[in-house]
Image: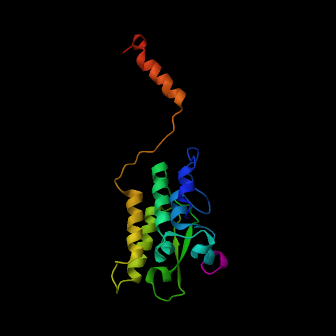
C-alpha cells in the first residue's frame, strides 16, 4: 500500500481482474484482506497477516491505525478496471483477525472468519456484524464500521461502472474509413 502513483501509471489491461488466487482470493479479497488461506489462528504466519508492517495487512487494521485511504483508493481503482466484488473466495479461505482491531480494547483474542465460497461483500458484512457485537455497549459508530461501510459502497455503490478498454488507433482509423464510405453501406 502507498504506491498509488505507481499503480495508476501501470498498464493493467492484460490483468485478469476476476481471477482467483489460492492464497489471496479475488482482487477485491486481496485488496481488502491480504492473505486469506493457510493461516492457523495462532501462528507466526497469522501474526504477519494481522500485522500491517509485514505488507499483507488488511482494511480493518488499516482503519484501526487511520491508514485506510490508500487501500480504499486501490479498491476504487480495481473496481474501475473491472474487478468484481461478487467473485467468490476459494473454499479453504479463512481470515484471522485480532479482536483488538474491532474493540479498540486490549485483547489477545483472534477471531477466524470463514471466507470460503464468499464474495468480498459477504466477508465485509461478517466482520461488520462481529464489530457490532464486540462494540455493542459503545454503539456501532466506530471508525472500523465507517470504513467497512465505505468499502461496501465502493464495491456495490451505484457509481459509474464502465470499464476502460484500450482500443488501438489503427482500429479507430478503420472504423472512421468505413463510416465515411457511404457507398459500402447496405442497410
Q: Is residue 149 left or right of residue 117?
A: left
* Residue at the bottom extreme of this rendering: 106
* Residue at the top extreme of this rendering: 183
Where 115 falls versus 136 (above or below)?
above
* Residue at the right extreme of this rendering: 44
User: In this orientation, does residue 40 appear?
Assistant: no
The structure residue drawn at horizontal position 42% and vertical position 14%, both measured from the top left corner, is 181
Question: Where in the figure is residue 184, as x and y percent of width and height?
Answer: 43, 12
User: In this orientation, does residue 62 appear?
Assistant: yes
User: Predominant secondary structure in magenta?
Assistant: loop
Question: Where in the figure is residue 97, as x and y percent of width and height?
Answer: 53, 76
Q: Is residue 133 magenta?
A: no
Q: Nearer the viewer, residue 187 or 122?
A: 187
The magenta segment is: 41-45
The structure residue drawn at horizontal position 65% and vertical position 75%, both measured from the top left corner, is 45
The structure residue drawn at horizontal position 53% and vertical position 52%, both measured from the top left corner, is 8
**Way the structure is coloured:** rainbow
Q: Nearer the viewer, residue 80 or 33?
A: 80
Picture quarter with the C terminus: top left
Q: Nearer the viewer, residue 29 or 182?
A: 182
Task: Say how many tags the image has.
Answer: 0
Picture quarter with the N terminus: bottom right
Where 67 falls versus 28 (above or below)?
below
Q: Is residue 43 magenta?
A: yes
Question: Where in the figure is residue 158, as x and y percent of width and height?
Answer: 34, 53
Question: Where in the figure is residue 83, as x and y percent of width and height?
Answer: 49, 52
The structure residue drawn at horizontal position 54% and vertical position 32%, both measured from the top left corner, is 168
Amino acid at each position: 500500500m502507498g504506491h498509488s502513483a505507481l499503480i495508476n501509471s501501470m498498464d493493467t489491461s492484460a490483468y485478469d481482474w476476476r481471477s482467483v488466487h489460492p492464497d489471496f482470493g479475488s482482487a477485491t479479497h486481496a485488496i481488502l484482506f491480504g492473505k486469506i488461506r493457510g493461516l492457523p489462528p495462532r501462528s507466526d504466519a497469522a501474526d504477519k497477516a494481522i500485522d500491517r508492517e509485514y505488507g499483507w495487512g488488511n482494511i480493518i487494521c488499516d482503519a484501526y491505525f487511520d491508514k485506510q485511504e490508500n487501500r480504499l483508493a486501490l479498491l476504487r481503482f480495481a473496481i474501475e478496471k473491472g474487478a468484481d466484488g461478487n467473485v467468490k473466495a476459494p473454499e479453504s479461505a479463512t481470515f484471522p483477525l485480532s479482536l483488538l482491531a474491532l474493540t479498540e480494547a486490549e485483547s489477545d483474542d483472534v477471531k477466524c472468519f470463514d471466507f470460503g465460497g464468499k464474495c468480498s461483500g459477504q466477508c465485509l458484512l461478517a466482520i461488520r456484524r462481529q464489530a457490532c457485537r464486540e462494540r455493542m455497549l459503545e454503539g456501532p459508530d466506530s471508525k472500523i464500521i465507517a470504513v467497512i461501510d465505505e468499502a461496501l459502497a465502493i464495491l456495490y455503490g451505484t457509481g459509474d461502472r464502465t470499464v476502460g478498454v484500450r482500443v488501438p488507433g489503427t482500429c479507430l482509423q478503420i472504423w472512421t474509413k468505413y463510416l465515411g464510405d457511404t457507398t459500402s453501406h447496405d442497410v
